[in-house]
Amino acid sequence: MMRKQVRPAIVMTLLLCIITGFIYPGVVTGLAQLVFSRQANGSLVEVNGRVVGSALIGQTFMQPYYFHSRPSAAGSGYDATASGGTNKGPTDRKLADTLVAQAIDSAVKIDHVTKGQIPGDMVTSSASGLDPHISPENAHQQVPRVATSRRVTVEVIQALVDAHTETRQFGFFGEPRVNVLLLNIALDSAFSRIDPTRKGSAK
């Protein structure tokens, strides 16, 4: 009796392991590589044959001639192995008095924005800490700094931001957004980067 029960159980277990552990993942992986090869491989972004990042994961940009990403609480910033937010709610005094206050002071100092008119994503991190996008309002606040560093007009930089502003998916999902990495790559492709420590120099 026991033998009749054990044998089918072992056979079914092995069969399910083969189907769910090898056949199904193999089929899904193959279809993904065939139909969505770029997305399946991480939506990697290349410049001159060199991978510079992913369109799905943000990066920290500190130089004045680049658009800056929103703050990140993932590790030391945009660490894909430590994805997460600050876990601090709107009533947490440390969030308001320390983290957000510091971000506001930084935005005022770097981009000369006016307190009370600062976009939320300019001073708060996303839930994942890996958001590669900023809002068009955030980008607009940074346009004068980038234009000055690139030695071009504000109108030219704003036009580039507008060209890289993504609309709502299918017209109603999400909000308009700007991918910071792709925008900064377009900046490097179109304009020189000015070294603020050396007058008249470019790199």
Image: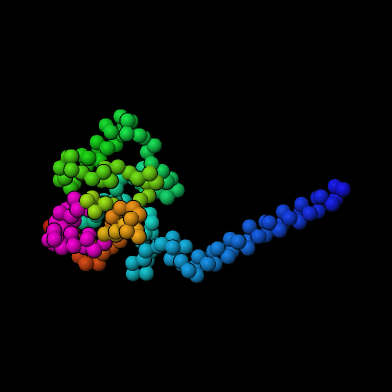
For the stretch drawn in magenta, what is the main secondary structure? helix
Which of the 4 image quarters holds residue 152?
Answer: bottom left
Residue 110 position within the rendered picture, expressed as x and y whole percent measured from the top left: 18, 46
**What residue is shown at x 37% (from left), y 69% (from top)?**
49
**What residue is shown at x 24% (from left), y 36% (from top)?**
101
Q: Is residue 84 visible?
A: yes
* Horizontal relation, residue 87 to residue 8: left or right: left
Above or below: residue 194 compared with residue 87: below
**What residue is shown at x 63% (from left), y 61% (from top)?**
22
Residue 174 position within the rendered picture, expressed as x and y whole percent measured from the top left: 34, 53
> Within the magenta stretch, is there residue 167?
no
**What residue is shown at x 65% (from left), y 60% (from top)?**
19
Which of the 4 image quarters holds residue 65?
Answer: bottom left
The one nearer the camera, 78 or 22, is 22
* Horizontal relation, residue 177 to residue 16: left or right: left
Residue 187 position within the rendered picture, expressed as x and y whole percent measured from the top left: 23, 63
Quarter containing the C terminus = bottom left
Residue found at the very far right of the displayed protein: 1
Q: Is residue 61 visible?
A: no
> Within the magenta stretch, is there residue 140?
yes
Q: Which residues are magenta?
A: 139-164
Residue 156 position within the rendered picture, expressed as x and y whole percent measured from the top left: 15, 63
